[in-house]
Image: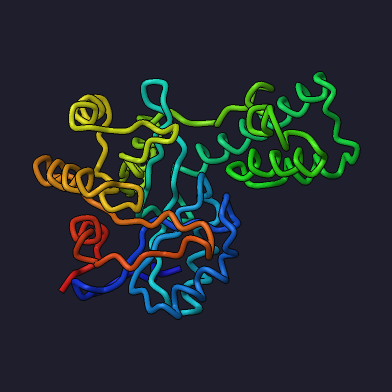
Amino acid sequence: MEASTRHLVLAPDAAIDLQLHTTFSDGTWTPEQLIDSLVREQFGLVAITDHDRVDTAAVLQQLAAEKQLPLLAAVEMSTSWSGELTDVLCYGFDPEKNELGELAQAIAHRQRENTRQVCENLGKLGISFPNVHELDALLAQPSAQQPHALVALLKRLGYGTGEPSAGTLITEAGFSWATNDLATVVDAAHRSGAVCLIAHPGRGEGYTCYDGQLLDELRRQVPIDGLEVYYPAHTPEQIAMYREYAKTHGLLTSSGSDSHGPEKMPIKYRAELSQSLLERLGIQIS
């Protein structure tokens, strides 16, 4: 399939959003709902970055092409660096042939095994799942959705509605996010013709919160290509700092809402905010 971004030219003020999620990972948008919404809102370019779902990129390309919506091949990969969570956004790989797929499949396998182990440990604590089909359905969920689905299941069964919370229960039963090594993911992305940017570097909330010194240390170890500078949770001071850091070090910049559903809509970022990234991917801003 020919990429929908081939020969694409965008005006500097064209609306783009380069971090979006659907039910293929932990979103509530179905792919069709999200694409229809983006078309109605006249976005010029988007990226659907479902967590560790390289396998759905071709399907998304086809759905977007049917609605004539330019869509970057993209994924948000779950990684760790120095023992902490760091998500990375990978843009521009071939959906049909790349080296990210095996890493994403490894995440899915390890997360499923962790979910299974958590359920076994909850059983040892006296928390049982009377309907075995509910457990099977849980394990069939995308890896990024499984802990959320497990929390919801526990609450439906009457567990974790007070203290301890359902989230605490699964944590104490051994829940952990499955990740790949950051350097391994970046290397696979580069060998697949993609670029890698640190997602929401200033978000915190369990993820590494990067300042200039920490970014220097990261870049000495891993050849990261850029930063998601424009992100709803970033303060104006963080945006200014990341923008200046990227300019100083020749890094690419991206802009993403992290929309997972209609309750948090996509944001119309100006294409020129991510001009360096888009031009690297063969998209002209004029």
Label total for image: 0
Which residue is painted at 52% across and 68% down in the image?
A: 34
Residue 258: x percent and y percent? Answer: 43, 54
Which residue is painted at 63% across and 26% down in the image?
A: 171
Q: Is residue 81 left or right of residue 276?
A: right
Residue 192: x percent and y percent? Answer: 37, 46
Which quadrant: the C terminus?
bottom left
Image height of 31 relative to 75, above or below: below
Type of colouring: rainbow
Which residue is the extreme one toward the left? Answer: 248
Which residue is painted at 26% across and 28% down in the image?
A: 218
Q: Is residue 161 left or right of residue 219?
A: right
Image height of 202 relative to 75, above or below: above
Which residue is the extreme one toward the top? Answer: 124
Say which quarter of the image contains residue 123.
top right
Residue 118: x percent and y percent? Answer: 71, 26
Say which quarter of the image contains residue 226.
top left
The front one of 198 and 158 is: 158
Image height of 278 relative to 88, above or below: below
Residue 229: x percent and y percent? Answer: 25, 49
Say which quarter of the image contains residue 212.
top left
Which residue is painted at 30% across and 71% down in the image?
A: 15
Which residue is the extreme one toward the front? Answer: 162
